[in-house]
Amino acid sequence: MAYKGTITLAITGASGSAYALRLLQCLLAAEYKVYVLISSAARVVLDTETGFKLPGSPDAATAILVEKFNAKEGQLKVFGKEQWFSPVASGSAAPKQMIVCPCSTGTLAAISQGMSDNLIERAADVVIKERGQLILVPRETPFSTIHLANMHSLSQMGVTIMPAAPGFYHNPESIDDLIDFMVGRMLDHLGIEQAIMPRWGYQ
């Protein structure tokens, strides 16, 4: 099947794993192929915050996510942190769009310094060097001067910094409404049509 495009979704150990699950659901529903990168800390946070358990094996994690979101054959692929021969590790094969959601401040720091110690950091480094689109969704408060300096440095490189800070002007009635606010904004920046969040002035 021909998909509309391919996007790399990296999930790190910051709080806010529900954003990642909803974003993945929306990307698949929009008929995009998704490469998923999940840190060890992210699996712990996923279980803690949502009760969703993902095994460490990339193939087993792929199977579980495919079943959970009813993905089509070949539409979703999970890669391990040291699968250096995966498409995302090379500028000749990596998708031009990548989002790290949620993005820990440790991952933020590593990306800002070009420290490719795992596949998430390498994939982000590839997108930056290939002049692709990289979106980082940090979830931390307050931000230290170090965090802000790293975000400023990345922003100057063209990286979009989108803190997980949902608005309230759409009168949210549930946590899901707050999640959809942020995921809707992520989809907007990825250039993917969405109807999960009402736009300003159109409520």
Image (cartoon, rainbow, N blue to C red):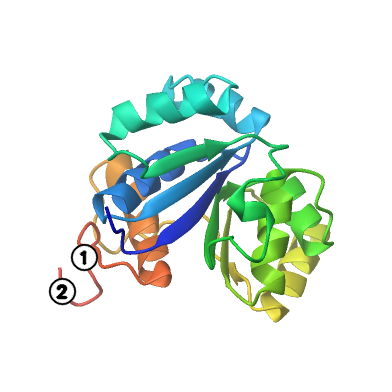
Mark 2 in CB contact with mark 1 (< 8 angstroms): yes
Location of residue 140 in the rendering, given as x and y in whole percent from the top left corner: 63, 48
Q: Which residue is at the far left?
A: 203
Instruction: Specify the label residue 53 is tagged with.
Output: none
Quadrant assignment for the C terminus? bottom left
- Left or right: 153 as drawn, with respect to 65: right
Dot 2 lies on which element? Answer: loop
Residue positioned 33% across, 40% down in the render: 175
Label 1, residues with CA under 10 Å away: few <14, some 14-19, many ≥20: some
Dot 1 lies on which element? Answer: loop
Residue 182 falls in which quadrant of the image?
A: bottom left
Which residue is nearer to you in this view: 75 or 113?
75
Residue 24 falls in which quadrant of the image?
A: top left
Please name the amino acid that badge 1 sits on.
Pro
Up/down of 121 relative to 158, above or below: above
Residue 84 falls in which quadrant of the image?
A: top right
Please name the amino acid that badge 2 sits on.
Tyr
Location of residue 44 in the rendering, given as x and y in whole percent from the top left corner: 59, 23
Which residue is nearer to you in this view: 177 or 53?
53
Which residue is nearer to you in this view: 167 or 188?
188
Q: Is residue 175 visible?
A: yes
Residue holding disc 2: 202
Cα distance between the residues tagged 2 and 1: 6 Å
Instruction: Specify the label residue 198 is tagged with.
Output: 1
Location of residue 127 in the rendering, given as x and y in whole percent from the top left corner: 64, 66
Location of residue 92 in the rendering, given as x and y in whole percent from the top left corner: 63, 66
Residue positioned 84% across, 54% down in the render: 115
Residue positioned 61% across, 54% down in the render: 88
Residue positioned 66% across, 74% down in the render: 130
